[in-house]
Image: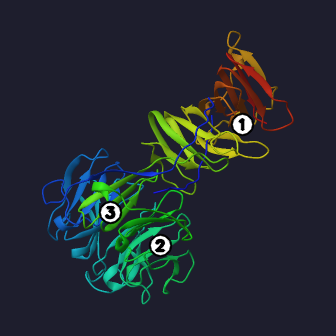
Amino acid sequence: MRILAVAVVALVVAVASARADVEGEPPLGTPGTLPGQLLGPTGVTRAFDGNIYVANTGNDRIEVFAPDGTALPALGGPGSGPGQFSQPSSVYGLAAEPSLLVLDAGNNRVQKLSLNGVPVASFNGPSGTGSLPGSFNAPQGITADVDGRFWVADTGNDRVQAFGADGTYLETFGEGALSRPRGVALGLNGTLYVSDSGHNQIVAYAPGAPRNGPGTQVVGPGSLPGQVEDPGGIAVDAFGRLDVADSGNARIERFTADGTYLDSYRGEGSAQLRRPEGIFVTPPGDLLVADVAASVIVRAKETLPPPVAGKSANITKTAGQVFVTRPRSRTAEPLDQPLHIPVGTTIDTRRGAVRIESAQSTKPGDTQVGNAFDGRFIFRQRVQPAVVTNLVLTGGSFATCPAVTRNRPAATARATTSKKRKTKDKPSGHEVRHLWGNAKGPTKTTGSDASASDKGTEWLTADYCNGTLVRVRRGVVFVRPLRGNAKPIRVTAGNQVFVPRR
């Protein structure tokens, strides 16, 4: 499956071309009823702990796999009590807490569980099974936002229902217009996508659009590329692309947010798709597909596309713990594998380090790499008049800075050598935030009062209550005060410069 994307970052020069393909991996599970085996699975998710959870529909339980594919103890078993299941049809890992939402279709309810299977809550409206608001009839798909609100494809009632994080009924979509909806997903702008399987289409309800109509068709019926037949689960990836389990055509199809066709994936060998139903897309774009006919979880890994100047970059954790927060998101995701990120992404390396590959120019394949560590920053990139990567320090708070240091009159910024460095050369007031980086190429770090541009070096940028300090460990850095008309200051290895706050 050919994958398109958008993202960037920069910092040692390396020119490389990268292909963006999805490559099949060995499937998870084998058909059967024994522990770790699957029988007609219809849902799959990756949860807060990184493990993979499967709605093992025919076995009335939630199967659990470690990231390396090792089978772990299952959750629940047959029954109607708390933490028990009857034909669970979908499972969703909440982004901001270690919990699961499970569509317990045979019991017509939503169950919320801890990741070790302890029941937390159960939701099924005022009358349990039925068609009243908040009740269900054979529900098949579920999704949630970062606040825990969730949406359910209430298949037997031909509608989608929305609920608050506490299970309070909010509203209904598509009543009288949808036919057997089986999948739901939220777009990056809040658009609700629905797989309307009875009409062989994908429809969208934009924020503010009427809820009681048929929605806007973004994908139509058929068997040609870009069409769907009896669609099941759907998912939206980190770049807003829509992935559809095109069950009737035995494939996964990928579209842009407006329904423009991008590509298809059918699998191969033991991982060839037969009837894909549930689908989950990891932040890097890897696919997890519950194949109800083959009774396995098909996996396909996305290799990273090349960085695009002004739009995207590739990052890889090199040490410790690193967290990534995407633009418009409030959820910090652990960086466990290489990731393609958009400009505006926040990267937290306060307990770790990352390698950043970014575009060095607008020429395709012209990339550079570098490292950032021991700080939190936003990745930005300017394209005009030339491509420059900018790591902007973020986090911390100046609210606790003493007024005497916040309002200290400006002094003259000057470099000092490490041998002559004295107490009076150090910034007063406590340090608010800092970031180490090394790079060779058009890269700079930006603090509250100064930016530092590299010429092949390693340097520290630190914000204090009364200004910004830049200390050079290797190479040469040019420090530019952000206010006033002061000229850039050339700082060599072993030296530092402090730019007071104005």
Kind of residue at disc 3: Leu
For discs 1 and 3, the disc positioned in front in the rendered view: 3
Distance between mark 2 and mark 3 Cα atoms: 23 Å
Q: Quadrant of the N terminus?
A: bottom left
Badge number at residue 273: 3
Are the residues flagged by discs 2 and 3 in contact, CB closer than 8 Å? no
Number of residues whose C-alpha sits closer than 10 Å to that of mark 1, classed few (under 14), some (14–19) or many (20 or more):
some
Residue 369 location (% of width, % of height):
59, 34
Quadrant of the image occupied by residue 162: bottom left
Q: Measuring from the top left, give residue 315's x and y in whole percent.
A: 53, 41
**Circle 1 sits in a helix, a strand or a loop, which is it?**
helix
* Secondary structure type for disc 3: loop
Between 212 and 415, the residue placed more toward the observer is: 212
Mark 2–mark 1 distance (CA, rounded to whole Å): 49 Å
Residue drawn at 63 percent across, 48 percent down: 308
Quarter the C terminus occupies: top right
Residue 58, which numbered label? none
The vertical placement of 253 against 4, above or below, is: below
Taking the view exactly as shown, the residue that stands out farthest to the right is 485
Amino acid type of disc 2?
Tyr
Q: Is residue 439 left or right of residue 349?
A: right
Residue at image x 25%, y 64%? Answer: 41
For marks 2 and 1 on the same chain, the one whose residue lies earlier in the sequence:
2
Q: Which residue is mark 2?
A: 193
Q: Are marks 1 and 3 in contact (CB under 8 Å)?
A: no
Q: Which residue is mark 1?
A: 406
Q: Position of residue 66 (x, y in %)?
A: 28, 47
Q: Residue furthest left?
A: 34
Image marks 2 and 1: residues in contact by CB distance under 8 Å: no
Q: Residue at x 67, y 47 (%)?
A: 309
